[in-house]
Image (tube, rainbow, N blue to C red):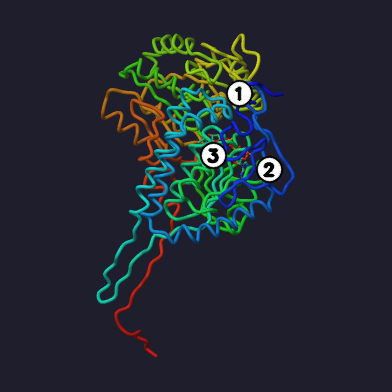
Amino acid sequence: MTHGLDQAWAGRRIGYAEPMDMLRLYIDGGYVDSDSGQTFHTVNPATEAIITEVQQASDADVDRAVDSARRGFAEWSAMTGAERGRILNGAARLLRERNEELARLEVLDTGKPIAEAITVDVLSGADCVEYYAGMAATLKGDHYDLGGDFAYTRREPLGVTGGIGAWNYPIQIACWKSAPALACGNAMVFKPAELTPLTAARLAEVYTEAGVPDGVFNVVQGDARTGQAMVAHPGIAKISLTGEVGTGKKVMAAAAATLKHVTLELGGKSPLIVFEDADIDNAVSAALLANFYTQGEVCSNGTRVFVHESIHADFIGRLAARAEKMTIGDPLDPATDVGALISEGHFQKVLGYIDMARDAGARLVCGGGRPPGIDRGWFVEPTVFDQCTDDMRFVTEEIFGPVMAVLTFDSEDEVVARANDTVYGLAAGVFTNDLARGHRVAAALDAGVVWINTYNLTPIEIPFGGYKQSGIGRENSHAAIEHYTQLKSVYVASGDVDAPY
Ligand code: NDP
C-alpha cells in the first residue's frame, strides 16, 4: 500500500544524495549494494504506507563495513584532535542547515509530531556533534613525576566501534553514539533500528560532505541479525546499544566472547514524585511531557506518577483537563501534540497493557484506546489510570506508549522505597518547593538522572545513563569520552636498567 505523501518523499525526492527507489548500505564513503539480496520496507506509522525499500546487510556486508572502518580509522586517528574537531563542526553546521528536511524524514519514519522533530531531534544531534567537535582538541593524558624517571598517559581511541540504535530517536541516537566516538579518533559501524532506517544514512552523507574520511562512519541496515553480526565481530572493539533491557542482556553476553567494551542505554519505568508543597500546575505539565511526548516512546519517561495523598484529587482534575485537550493526529501538522506509535505490533502491545490495567482494577481517567475518528495509523490516546497499585503489571513493566499510572503516597520514606522498588533505574523526577527535601530525595533515588521541578531535559553537557538494569556506562558529557578511549601508560627511564644479575 502506498500513499501520495510518502511517494512524494520516495526516490530522489526523499533527499538522499543519489536517486534511490531503495535505500542501500553506506560503506566507505558512499552507497553500496548489499550482497544479501534481501530487502525490507520502512513504513509510515501514521498512514501505514510504505516509504521505501531498504537493503538488508548480510554478515559479509558487516565484514565489508568493518574493513572499511579499519582503513578509515588509520587515516582519521592520525589527524590531530583539532583537525577532527574542525571537520565535525562542519558536520554540525550541515545538520542545522538540513534540520527541516531531516526532521520531516524522521516524522515519516517514526510517526512523531513535527513540532517535536523540528525543535529537538536533529538540533539536539547537531548540539552533540558540535559539543564533541569542541572536545576533540582537548583530549589529553597526564604526566607523572617519578624522581628522575617519569611516565605519561595517552588517551587513545579504541579502533572500530559499533553503534546499534533504537527507533524512537533515530538521528539523535546516531549522533549521541557517533559524535563522541569520532571525536576521540575512532571509526564506527552503525546500525539503525530496522523500523527507522532513513536518517542514519543521511547523517553518513553529512559526515562525508563535511570531510570525514571514507570509511570512518558506515551504516549497515538490517534487523537483529545484523546487530548480532556486529556484536560477534572480532574487528569491532566496542558496542554501544540503545534498546530494551532484554536486548542489552543478549548483547552483553555475546560481547563477552570477544571481551568488547559495552555501553548499554536501556529501558526504564521511572518515578515522578509530586510532594504536597509542589507547584501543582508545574508538576502536571511535567507529568504530561513525561508520559505523552513522542507518544510516550521515551526511555526515561516518568510513567509511575506518585502524588501526595493530600493533593491527589486536585492533581488528577487538572491533569485530566489538560490531557483531554491534547491534539492527536497527522504528525506533519505543526498543531499535533501526539503522533502515531511506531508499528502495529507495538500498538497492539500498548493496547494490551491498557486492557491489563482495566482488568487489574485501575480507574481509567482519560484516553484508553484508538482515538475516535482515526481508523488508519497506529494512534493511541493519551491515557491516564488512577487508583493504581505498585504490584499491577502495567505499573511495573515498561510500556513505551502514552499510558500513565498515578499512585498516591503519605510519607517521604515510603515514596522513596516504593520508587526504588524496581529493576530499572534510568531516571526520576521530584516536585517540591522544599530545597532540602529535593536534594535529599534526589540522593536517595536509585536513578542515573534525577530532575528536580522539571523532567526529561537531557542537554548534551550532562551525563545520561541508567542505574541497575537500565544500563551500563554513560552517554553525553565528558563521561562518554571515557567510554570511547583507552588509557596507555608510558614509562620513561632516565638511567640504565638496574639488573641485580
Ligand atoms: P530493541 O532492544 O528491540 O532494539 C534495539 C536495537 O537493537 C535495534 O537496532 C535492534 O534491531 C537491535 N537488536 C535487537 N536484538 C539484537 C541482538 N540480539 N543483538 C544485537 N542487536 C540487536 O529496542 P527498540 O528498538 O524496541 O527500542 C525501544 C527500547 O529502547 C525501549 O526499551 C527503550 O526504553 C529503550 N531506549 C533506551 C534509551 C536510553 O537511552 N536508555 C533511549 C531510547 C530507547 P532491530 O532493527 O531488529 O529492531
Going by the numbered disc 1, the residue's amino acid type is: Val
Label 3 or label 1, whichever lies nearer to me, is: 3
Question: Does the image show residue 469?
Answer: no
Tell me which residue sits at (45%, 59%) in the image. 77
Going by the numbered disc 3, the residue's amino acid type is: Arg
In the rendered structure, are the residues bearing label 3 and label 1 in contact, judged by CB atoms less than 8 Å apart? no
> Which of marks 2 and 3 precedes in the sequence?
2
In the rendered structure, are the residues bearing label 2 and label 1 in contact, judged by CB atoms less than 8 Å apart? no
Does residue 490 appear left or right of residue 46 in this picture? left
Task: Locate the C terminus by quadrant.
Answer: bottom left
- The location of residue 426, given as percent across then percent down, is 46, 36
Question: Which residue corresponds to mark 1?
Answer: 350
- Name the outermost residue toward the bottom: 501
Question: Which residue corresponds to mark 3?
Answer: 202
Q: Would the CB of label 2 be found within 8 Å of ligand 1?
A: no
Describe the element under mark 3 as helix, strand or loop: helix
Give the answer, above or below, for where 230 lies relative to 462.
below
Q: Would the CB of label 1 be found within 8 Å of ligand 1?
A: no
> Which of marks 1 and 3 precedes in the sequence?
3
10 Å neighbourhood of mark 3: few (<14), some, or many (≥20)? many
10 Å neighbourhood of mark 2: few (<14), some, or many (≥20)? many
Question: Which residue corresponds to mark 2?
Answer: 56
Going by the numbered disc 2, the residue's amino acid type is: Gln
Which of the pair 319/42 is nearer the observer? Answer: 42
- The location of residue 379, given as percent across then percent down, is 59, 19
Q: CA distance from mark 3 to mark 2?
A: 17 Å
Label 3 or label 2, whichever lies nearer to me, is: 3
Tell me which residue sits at (39%, 31%) in the image. 457
Image quadrant of ligand 1 equals: top right
Task: Locate the N terminus by quadrant.
Answer: top right
